[in-house]
Image (cartoon, rainbow, N blue to C red):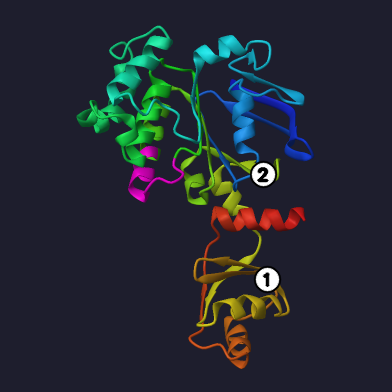
Amino acid sequence: MENPSIIVRNISRSYGSVKALDDISFEILKGELFGFIGPDGAGKTTLFRILATLLLPDEGTASVEGLDVVKDFKKIRKILGYMPGRFSLYMDLSVEENLSFYATIFGTTIEENYNLIKDIYRQIEPFKKRKAGQLSGGMKQKLALCCALIHKPAVIFLDEPTTGVDAVSRMEFWEMLRRLKESNITIMVSTPYMDEASLCDRVALIQDGKIMKISKPDEIVADYRHELWAVRSGRFFELLSDLRAYPGIHSVHAFGQAAHVAFDKSGMTAEDLRKYLINNRHKDVVIEEIKPTIEDCFMELMSSEK
């Protein structure tokens, strides 16, 4: 891979008998927006803490901008912006005071790197005298991102930055990340939200400490090899059970109020399935062909791992 900013080789980490990371390897290009997509407990935070030099791996090596995460941890901390999953700024300091404090730690000023944060900071500047603890969830995340960027880092790690944030703030946050890419900052972000995967240049799907697949979002979807239907009825829980008993169906997963039904191209028709469901006392049956999402691909990969 040309010009990698982050290189991870065979990293493993355990907590007692629990293996949080299991022999994972990957590379991230300079200036790439790279996403780690997976549920809680998949190993995302452990990986971020290792790369941010806050945790030692049990096995393997990793480097950030050519610097070893163990040997060169002091140098890495000077070029790194890190936004942990839990809001960690000073609640009793104002917006302005938090930002000034972090700039001072890194030997810079708000004015020196204001151009890097101005698009974000303008949205919270009207509240610059307000204490951080009194901000909304979305405003807290914007302040945390400003503090992570104020020293103009080469790499920024964002650990589940939109968890617990409303839908509008989530969209605004990802728009800010896309603008940051123009500054050639390498961005590594983790999220449990599958819909955010499509906003990354590449994504790694991670589960139980293992990387199941790394690719561009559209290529992951293009690799999905099954026909897919969304099926609904008035008896949802019975619907899932009856669908799984139907011959020829590859998998059935609940997605909101619909069941996503995957099957191999074997001549199965929607009308045959409809008759089967009606015979099993289902009413208001709706069956429609759909295109797979990243989440469908993730569920398929999880099934194949078992």
Q: Which residue is drawn at the image coordinates 68% and 15% (left, top)?
A: 70
* SS assignment at label 2: strand
Q: Position of residue 234 (x, y in %)?
A: 50, 82
Does residue 168 belong to the magenta stretch?
Answer: yes
Residue 9 appears in the figure = yes
* Amino acid bearing label 1: Lys
* Amino acid bearing label 2: Lys
* SS assignment at label 1: loop
Residue occupied by mark 2: 213
Dot 2 and dot 1 residues touching (CB under 8 Å): no
Up-down relation of residue 261 to residue 145 (above or below): below
Q: Is residue 119 left or right of residue 287?
A: left
Residue 155 versus residue 272: which sits nearer the camera? 155
Residue stretch in magenta: 162-173
Q: Give residue 276's mark.
A: none
Q: Which residue is drawn at the image coordinates 56% and 53% (left, top)?
A: 294
Residue 2 appears in the figure = no
Q: Looking at the figure, which quarter contains the C terminus?
A: bottom right
Residue occupied by mark 1: 265
Crowding at dot 2, Cα within 10 Å, few <14 / some 14-19 / many 20+, comes out as some
